[in-house]
Image (tube, grey):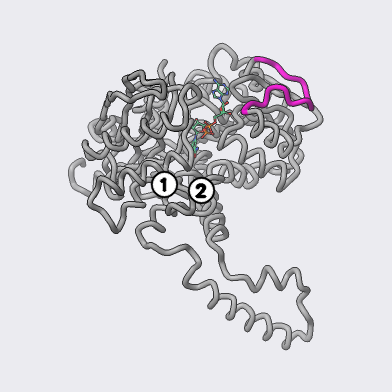
Amino acid sequence: MSLLEQVDAFFNKASSYLTYPKELLEQIRVCNSVLSVSFPIRRDDGRIEVIRGWRAEHSFHRLPTKGGIRLSENVDINEVMALAALMSYKCAIMDIPFGGAKGAIKINPKLYSINEIERIIRRYTFELYRKNFIGPGVDVPGPDMGTNEQHMAWIADTYMAISNDPMYYFACVTGKPVSQGGIRGRKQATGLGVFLALNYIIKDLSKKTIAIQGFGNVGYYLAYYLYNEINAKIVAISDVSGTLFNPNGIDINKLYEYQQENKTIKGFKDGIFFEDPNKVLEVECDILVPAAVENVINENNVDRIKANIIAEAANGPTTFNAHSKLLSLGKLIIPDIYLNAGGVTVSYFEWLKNLSHVRFGRLDKRLREENNLLLIKQIEELTNKKINDRDLEILKNGPKEEDVVKAGLYDTMVNAYEEISETAKRYNTDLKTAAFIVAINKIAITYQQLGIFP
Ligand code: NAD
C-alpha cells in the first residue's frame, strides 16, 4: 500500500467507530486541492534542468492551510497528498486552527550546490504565489525533510518581493531564522515536543533504553533532550548511511559534533557500525523512535521489532498492517499525528508572532518581574525567611520568548495526549485510532456547523 492508502486505511478504521454520514466523512478524507509544477533552473555548470514539485492543500475547513516542504528524490504526488492529510488531522488534534497542506520538490538536495537550491526554492515559491498556494491567510509552508531555516528565509524573502503585502509577509512561512521573523524554539520544536510527550506518558523514561532512526532535525533534538535533560541511554542511532549501536549508551553531544564535521555518523568511533540504516529498528531496546522516513516498519520486519513502545516521530513510519500486528503483540504505539505535532504547534506560535509583530513576553516581562519581586519580598517578611539566590532567580524572572514557547508547547502536548487517551478508553481502541477519531470529530463539527452536512 502507498502512504496515501495507509492513511486512508487508518482513517477508515477510525470512521467505523463513528456515525457521520458517509458524504461528510468523504469530504474530510479527500484532498481539496493539488498544484503540480515543473520549471527549469540553470545548474552551476550552465546545464538547464527541469524540476518537478507539488503542493497539496488537503482541507479548507480552516484557513490558512499549513504544512512543510520536503526535498526528496523519492517523493511523488500521492505521498504529498498523504502527508497533507496527516497535517489536517494533526492540526485538529492539537487545536491549531489550520487546515493541512504539504509541499515537495523532487530532488536529492545533496546533489545540488547551495546556490542551485536557492534558485529552486525561490522559483518554487514564485510558482506557489502565482497559483495562490501561499500567503499568510491562504497556505503557510514550513520546514520538513531536507529543508531548514535558510530555505524558509528564501521563501519569505521571495514572497515579500513579489506580493503586495508589506504588513504580514513574514507570516507566509514558518520555521524562519529568528532574525527573519522566526521564533525562538521552532528549530528544536518537533524533537522537543516528542521529548516532552514521552516524558509525560512513559514512567521512568530515564531508565529506558532507546533507539532512534534519523539524526536530522527531529532525531537530533529528541536525542539532545533525552541525553542532556534526563541522561537517558540511547543505544542506537541511524542516519541514511547506517546504524550506530552501543549498548552502553551513545554520547549524543560528541556524535553531533562528529556529524556536523563529517556530514554523516559513519566513522564515529564509539560503538559498532552497521551499513544498514534499518538495523536500528531491530536492536534490543525498550523504546524505538522512527524519526526519518515513512513505511519503515512494515510486514517484512515487524516480527523483528524488539521494543515494546514505538514512538512515531516521523510521519507515517508504520504501515497499517504492521500497526495491527504490533497491537496484537501488545505493543504501545504513540501515533505520529500526535507525537510529532510540536513543530506545527510552534509554527502556529510563530505565525501569531508575525501577525502581531511583537515578541512573546516583550510587553509584560518587566512588569511580571517587578510584581514577582514584590510578592517574594512580602513572603520573606511574613515568614521571616530568606529565599535562596538560586530559587529567587527562577521565581523573579518574567517570561522570555523561549519560556513562553516551551510552556505553550508542553501544555498543548499534554492536553492533546489526555484527549486521545480518554478517547481510546471511551472507544476501547488504540491510541492511533483514537487520535484519528479526535481529528475526525473536530473537523466534522466545523462542517456540520456550516449547515452543509446533517
Ligand atoms: P531531516 O532531513 O532533518 O533528517 C532526516 C534524517 O533521516 C537524516 O538523519 C537522514 O540521514 C535520515 N534518513 C533519510 N533517509 C533515510 C532512510 N531511508 N533510512 C534511515 N534514515 C534515513 O528530516 P526531519 O525534519 O528530521 O524529518 C524527519 C521526519 O520527521 C520526517 O518524517 C518528517 O516528515 C517528520 N517531521 C518533521 C518535522 C520538522 O519540523 N522538521 C515536523 C513533523 C514531522
Residue that carries the numbered disc 1 in the rendered image:
174
Q: Position of residue 221 (x, y in %)?
A: 61, 41
Quick one: quadrant of the C terminus? top left
Residue that carries the numbered disc 2 in the rendered image:
186
Q: Is residue 270 magenta?
A: yes
Side (left or right) of 39 relative to 189: left
Q: Position of residue 54 (x, y in %)?
A: 32, 28
Decide which of tag 1 and tag 2 comes sooner along the chain.
Answer: 1
Query: Is residue 434 at all visible to an observer of this figure?
Result: no
- Please name the residue shown 65% across and 28% down the image: 262
Side (left or right) of 432 relative to 443: right
Could you say which quadrant of the image residue 438 lies in? top left
Please tell me how crowded label 2 is: few (under 14), some (14-19), or many (20+) other residues with Cα within 10 Å: many
Residues at discs 1 and 2 in contact (Cβ within 8 Å): yes
Query: Hey, which residue is sitting farthest left in the picture?
Result: 452
Which labelled disc corresponds to residue 452? Answer: none
The magenta-colored residue range is: 263-275
Query: Is residue 343 at all visible to an observer of this figure?
Result: yes
